[in-house]
Amino acid sequence: MRNTSRRDIPLQELKASQPCELLEFLIDQQVRKSRNAIKSLLAHKQIKVNGKLVTQFDHELKAGDKVSVMKFDQSRKEKKLKGLKIVFEDDEIIVIDKEAGFLSVSTDKEKLRTVYGALNEYVKKKSRNKTDRVFVLHRLDREASGLMVFARNAELQEIFQKNWNNLVKEYIYTAVVDGRPEQEEGTVISWLTENKNYVMMSSPYDNGGLKSVTHYKVIKSTGRYSLLDFDLETKRKNQLRIQMQTIGHSVVGDKKYGASNNPIKRIALHVRELVLKHPVTGEVLEFKSPVPKAMLQLVTVQPKRESSAESDTKEQ
């Protein structure tokens, strides 16, 4: 039988004596002859900090942190979870990066495989206690992608529910919308209700619905499409999507809420940044997820091609 434990053999064991960035620490320790060779270790997932795999060159080390240079790519033994990637986990929380097209949790209408279900299976397989599971803190639309956080016990779930705004410092959505808003920054306020077809309806005045507040900022625009950042003051179902429709700038690909087309075969909505205060340690944790390339390409101006006549003129 093949011995796979060799993958866990550390080539070097180091200890940080003072706070510093991981890359600079590895360079100072001369773990490899060149800077590029050290970056390659990070890229090939051969660096662990306190036993956990780290790939970010700017990871902040604390005094006393143990850094291991591993012999093999550690990601090979990690089973990939369909529809999501785990970006952080400890005994209290799990932070994941969800792909577009996957439900975060099941609904009365749909019982398909969910991120919640996949995480529960993952936790049970890793734990000796088969009753271990994750607890839902919030939802993310199936068509959207990006960062989500789950609790590891019911007590923490309650703490998050009661103190969400104090614990979650930033939760930034990015979306590509049709057209360009007149104001570079703005706030949309409306009252939302849900009809019998599970579609959210928006009213500019209080009609008994839930008051919803969304702040937005234009990051980049081509005129036809614009990339916006959003800070949701309230957290309602489909809030961002329906409110952007009401001001005439639907999220690209969101035909449910007025989009004119679907050029990238998904809704152009992504959670790119999550900053939270750890509910137990109090440490402020920051997570980022790159905006999908397909979304960025919508707001990238393509250079105009010269006609053959123009090209011939320049050559003469």
Image (cartoon, rainbow, N blue to C red):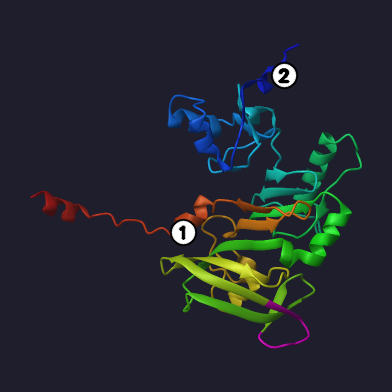
* Residue tagged 1: 298
Say whether residue 223 is visible: yes
Q: Look at 45% across and 55% down and name the residue there.
A: 297
Assign a secondary structure to mark 2: helix
Q: Residue furthest top?
A: 1
Q: Look at 69% across and 88% down and name the residue there.
A: 205
- Give the amino acid at mark 2: Ser
In the figure, 103 relative to 185: above or below? Answer: above
* Residue tagged 2: 5
Frontmost residue, 207 versus 272: 272
Residue 81 x, y percent position in the rendering: 71, 40
Q: Decide: marks 1, 2 in contact (CB < 8 A)? A: no
Residue 237 x, y percent position in the rendering: 73, 68
Say whether residue 144 is visible: no
Q: Residues within 10 Å of mark 1 (few under 14, many from 20)?
A: many
Q: Residues within 10 Å of mark 2 (few under 14, many from 20)?
A: few
Q: Is residue 23 left or right of residue 207?
A: left
The magenta segment is 204-212
The quadrant holding residue 2 is: top right
Residue 138 x, y percent position in the rendering: 76, 60
- Give the amino acid at mark 1: Leu
